[in-house]
């Protein structure tokens, strides 16, 4: 590993002291704890863009997290960084998401506006530090301080999580490790390419729309020229997947090469050099051409996919379900399971409701909505 990688000896230890494992490094152990958590399994039934019930081939938060982990792991290896650490951060990065995607988060944030708000990154930290209960000695997963710090994307935690505050304080005074910044970009790379693919599969996006974009036409032509005998013979879905894979590969290579060049230009020698950098000088990034291409893709997805009427309709229904559930639990907390009710004294009613609702899968929230209202949604 490079001297500026996150080294195991710099993990910062755990809040509750535990003996090191004889066969696994601390970050492998963090990764394994995340994989074995209930919150991680529930990601399989949470909306990425399309609701879990919309079709079996669309991405869910679980498959998205696995894809981010794969990209992050190989990018970290290419840059001689700590791939285990990057993998743990990638697998944990979406744990705090509500059901029904971003619409769910917005609805819950609005409902929590007088009680500290709701934001999925902060919720991920709450899950791994207190909501998961599977160990005898401590609440949460007792991850290393470095993993917690790496998960603090915006250097913020909830007021009601005092244990996390010293780590957050530290995080706010220094740049994140390269692995954390890399995972952030791998998340972006994974979702722009995969949302494009899912949107095409759902026939919300079509090839004519994409042909209007320079980068798509060029990539299509490149793949055709590299495979003159096969490309025209396969069905369009295979052509699309080949072009998207080509685009994604270029994007990852650009990220690796540009970041590596930046590290050389900045003459980074060790972790301390990195932490002292200004935010604008941070070495993880793309060439300006690739940065622009990603922005064009994000704009296109925003205009054509995320705001598509059927997708918006799904989001609005999700938001309504969350509003209704919140109102029901607020007026009668006994409707929540007892292991949530007992947390009210420590965290307040609203925070406990937000914890309970945000942990739900799409289908459980739908089921709960029917149970409490007697109506069926969708
Ligand atoms: Mg993500």
Image: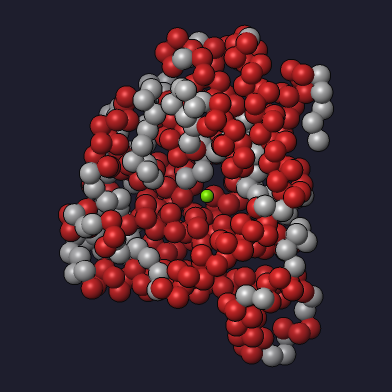
Colour scheme: secondary structure
Rendering coords of residue 59 (x, y %)? 65, 52
Given residues 94 and 317, the one toward you in this image is: 317
Q: Is residue 106 above or below residue 83?
A: above
Relative to 168, is 187 on the left or the right?
right
Given residues 259 and 20, the one toward you in this image is: 259
Rendering coords of residue 281 (x, y %)? 26, 62
Residue 24 visible to the viewer: no
Residue sitting at 35 percent across and 63 percent down? 284
Label total for image: 0
Task: Indicate the quadrant containing the C terminus: top left, top right, bottom left or bottom right.
Answer: top right
Task: Indicate the quadrant containing the N terminus: top left, top right, bottom left or bottom right.
Answer: bottom left
Residue sitting at 47 percent across and 59 percent down? 186
Q: Is residue 344 above or below residue 179?
A: above
Rendering coords of residue 4 (x, y %)? 24, 59
Residue 215 visible to the viewer: yes
Query: Residue 372, located in which quarter of the rendered image?
Result: top right
Residue sitting at 37 percent across and 55 percent down? 181
Rendering coords of residue 90 (x, y %)? 46, 50
Given residues 290 and 253, the one toward you in this image is: 290
Q: Is residue 60 above or below residue 105?
A: below
Relative to 372, is 124 on the left or the right?
left
Residue sitting at 33 percent across and 60 percent down? 81
Given residues 366 and 330, the one toward you in this image is: 330
């Amino acid at each position: 590993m490079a001297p500026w990688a996150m080294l195991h000896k710099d993990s910062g230890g755990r809040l509750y002291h535990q003996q090191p494992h004889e066969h696994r490094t601390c970050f492998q152990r963090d990764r394994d704890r995340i994989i074995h958590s209930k919150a991680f399994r529930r990601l399989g039934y949470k909306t990425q863009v399309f609701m879990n019930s919309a079709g079996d081939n669309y991405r869910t938060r679980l498959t998205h997290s696995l894809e981010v982990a794969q990209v992050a792991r190989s990018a970290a290896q290419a840059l001689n960084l700590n791939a285990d650490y990057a993998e743990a951060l990638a697998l944990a990065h979406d744990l705090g998401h509500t059901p029904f995607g971003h619409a769910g988060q917005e609805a819950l944030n609005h409902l929590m506006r007088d009680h500290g708000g709701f934001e999925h990154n902060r919720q991920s930290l709450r899950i791994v530090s207190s909501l998961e209960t599977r160990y005898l000695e401590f609440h949460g997963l007792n991850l290393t301080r470095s993993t917690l710090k790496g998960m603090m994307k915006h250097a913020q935690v909830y007021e009601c999580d005092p244990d996390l505050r010293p780590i957050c304080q530290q995080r706010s005074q220094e740049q994140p490790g390269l692995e954390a910044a890399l995972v952030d970009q791998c998340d972006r790379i994974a979702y722009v390419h995969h949302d494009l693919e899912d949107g095409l599969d759902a026939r919300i996006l079509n090839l004519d729309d994409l042909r209007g974009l320079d980068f798509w036409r060029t990539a299509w032509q490149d793949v055709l020229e590299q495979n003159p005998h096969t490309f025209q013979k396969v069905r369009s879905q295979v052509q699309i997947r080949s072009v998207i894979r080509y685009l994604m590969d270029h994007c990852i290579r650009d990220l690796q090469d540009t970041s590596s060049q930046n590290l050389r230009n900045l003459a980074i020698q060790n972790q301390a050099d990195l932490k002292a950098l200004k935010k604008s000088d941070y070495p993880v990034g793309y060439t300006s051409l690739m940065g622009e291409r990603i922005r064009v893709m994000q704009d296109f997805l925003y205009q054509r996919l995320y705001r598509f009427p059927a997708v918006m309709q799904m989001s609005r229904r999700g938001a309504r379900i969350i509003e209704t559930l919140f109102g029901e639990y607020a007026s009668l907390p006994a409707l929540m399971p007892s292991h949530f009710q007992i947390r009210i004294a420590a965290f307040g009613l609203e925070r406990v409701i937000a914890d309970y609702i945000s942990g739900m899968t799409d289908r459980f929230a739908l089921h709960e909505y029917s149970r409490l209202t007697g109506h069926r949604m969708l």
